[in-house]
Amino acid sequence: MILEGIVTTVSREGAVNIAPMGPRVDETMQRFTLRPYKTARTYQNLKKHSEGVFHITDDVLLLARAAIGYTEPEPQLQPATCIRGFVLQECCRYFEFRVEHFDDSEDRAELRARVVHSARIRDFFGFNRAKHAVVEAAILTTRVAFLQVDTILAEFARLETIVRKTGGTQELSAFSLLREHVEHAPRQTGNKVESA
Ligand SMILES: Cc1cc2nc3c(=O)[nH]c(=O)nc-3n(C[C@H](O)[C@H](O)[C@H](O)COP(=O)(O)O)c2cc1C
């Protein structure tokens, strides 16, 4: 199955990158397969330094911020225990990993990773429809460069009903952040790209 989470990696210069990623996992979580596009910073960082941290979280504001490129407020990061990397403190569980095999034959690479250390920071909140709707909205937001903005906004209208009905402050803030990002994205009309 695919488990949606957040991956931190470090560049050669030591800059931390935070990106939502959905690796293929099994229940043991001892190994997993990351599938980043080769254009992703996560892929480029892991090619140079094959260690990172995969985080599971119910904090959808954290996920939304990661999806639009983390700026403010500063993420809370602590050095990892067994690898050169960083742990996001707002997560529930995390898995420090080392990539052992790269398959670069397709645009979407397959990186087989082994977990070298894992830990729990806090409990997972539980099922909530608004949280899941924000995850869907975050995925759509990261596809803004190759999907029509109007198509994304039509889907947002459906998701917004769920967020309003079942969410709290965190879910509403995360959803607004994503919608604002999409609304300000350049609009694609055929081959032409126009500003929103
Ligand atoms: C929940 C979620 C899961 C995602 N999973 C992947 C993935 O498995 N592979 C991928 O290339 N992009 C995935 N994305 C999109 C990336 O997060 C997005 O392209 C991001 O800009 C990559 O960041 P980076 O360039 O800093 O690595 C996902 C986005 C979300 C919101």
Image: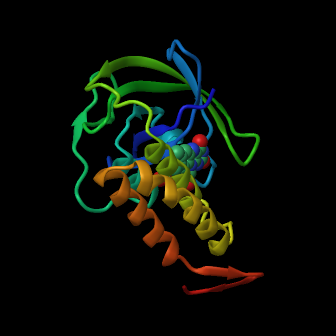
Quadrant assignment, res 169 = bottom left
Q: Position of residue 73 (x, y in %)?
A: 23, 58
Residue 120 vs residue 124, the one in the foreground: 124
Type of colouring:
rainbow
Residue 39 vs residue 170: left or right? right
Q: In the visual, does 158 lie left or right of 7?
A: right
Residue 52, given in percent of the width and then of the height, sits at 42, 34
Front residue of 114 and 21: 21
User: From where the camera sits, is residue 111 visible?
Assistant: yes
Left or right: 154 as drawn, with respect to 81: right
* Image: 76 above or below 162: above
In the rendered view, tell whether residue 53 sits above or below residue 115: below
Q: Residue at the spot x=27%, y=39% of the render?
A: 90
The quadrant in which residue 164 appears is bottom left
Which corner quadrant holds the C terminus?
bottom right
Q: Residue at x 44, y 44 (%)?
A: 131
Q: Quadrant of the N terminus?
A: top right
Task: Give the mark count.
Answer: 0
The correct choice, above or below, for 4 with respect to 63 in the image is above
Point out the residue furthest to the top here: 28
- Residue 160 coordinates in the image, percent (x, y): 49, 60
Coordinates of residue 18 in the picture (x, y in percent): 39, 48
Q: Is residue 63 left or right of residue 89?
A: right
Q: Residue at 68% of width from left, 66% of height from top?
A: 146
Residue located 54% across and 18% down the image? 31
Residue 44 in view in this figure: no
Asked where in the image residue 119 lies, by quadrant, the reply is top left
